[in-house]
Amino acid sequence: MPLARFLEEPTDAGASALASRWTEDPPLEHAGYVELLRDFPEVMRAASSISPQALKLVASHTVRTCRAMAAFVAREEQGALRLRDLADLKAYCYAVAGIVGEMLTELFLLAGGGLTGGGAAGVAADLRRDAAAFGEALQLVNILKDTAADEIEGRHYLPEGMARSAVFSQARRDLGIAAGYCARLESVSADRGIVAFTALPILLARATLDRVEESGPGAKITRGEVTAIVASLHEALARGAAARLFEIDPGSRPEKGSE
């Protein structure tokens, strides 16, 4: 895992060496991804402009993601990954997106953004507890939406023989936890931008999940529906009532799994 090892001890020379290696023998064919790999030294220079503490957090969580994903890639047979059961699916979603939720939570807490006073100290533990589910919920919705397209390309994220209803139920449980996560941010007067950043993907995911359950894989919400969701969120944010969009009392601490 060259990237993971690099991020543990990053240097300009190491970034250039990795970029040369990837350019000479690209690990994939997508032109945009190959361009990004070629420009890796520039990516790292941009990353160095953030605070050392933030950069350390991003690097450490990226290392965890690299190593977790490497374990799944090692299981591929003839270029295809098949997940075994719901626990395996959740582990995959954690590797892909749960760790991202944990990273974002630590960055929110590091930056402050209204999370340094009042009842914020007590809510930090709750945010950390539910951070992974926040990311996993969004990934599960994407998997359910893209099932047909993924299978054509040899990706089988839904375990064979598992009822889709079980995956929908898990996605709704995780979205409920994610909604509570966002509501807690608002309850301690977190920066409005942070609340919006977490609320919008949850609202879009919930609407998408409803559409996919109703119409099947590949179904999407319309641009008009997206516009309406964004408008309602802006209105709610202005009133400090984004939690109401999730039907959650902003003064409460929703239980895990509630919506």
Image (cartoon, rainbow, N blue to C red):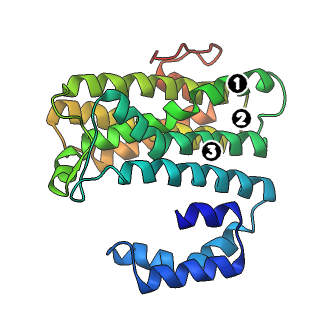
Q: Residue at x 41, y 72 (%)?
A: 33
Which marked residue is nearer to the observer: mark 2 or mark 1? 1
Mark 2 surroundings within 10 Å by alpha-carbon count, few (fewer than 14), some (14 through 19), many (20 or more): many
Q: Which residue is mark 3?
A: 103
Residue type marked 1: Ala
Q: Is residue 155 left or right of residue 55?
A: left
Of 90 and 200, nearer the camera is 90
Which marked residue is nearer to the observer: mark 2 or mark 3? 3
Residue type marked 2: Ala
Mark 1 surroundings within 10 Å by alpha-carbon count, few (fewer than 14), some (14 through 19), many (20 or more): few
Q: CA distance from mark 2 to mark 3?
A: 17 Å
> Mark 1 or 3 closer to N-term?
3
Q: Are marks 2 and 1 in contact (CB under 8 Å)?
A: no
The quarter of the picture where residue 78 lies is bottom left
Q: Residue at x 77, y 46 (%)?
A: 111
Element type where label 2 sits in the image: loop
Question: What is the number of the mark on residue 167?
Answer: none
Q: Which residue is mark 2?
A: 190
Of 258 and 1, nearer the camera is 1
Residue type marked 3: Met
Q: CA distance from mark 1 to mark 3?
A: 14 Å
Of 129 and 201, nearer the camera is 129
Q: Residue at x 47, y 24 (%)?
A: 246
Q: Which residue is mark 1?
A: 125
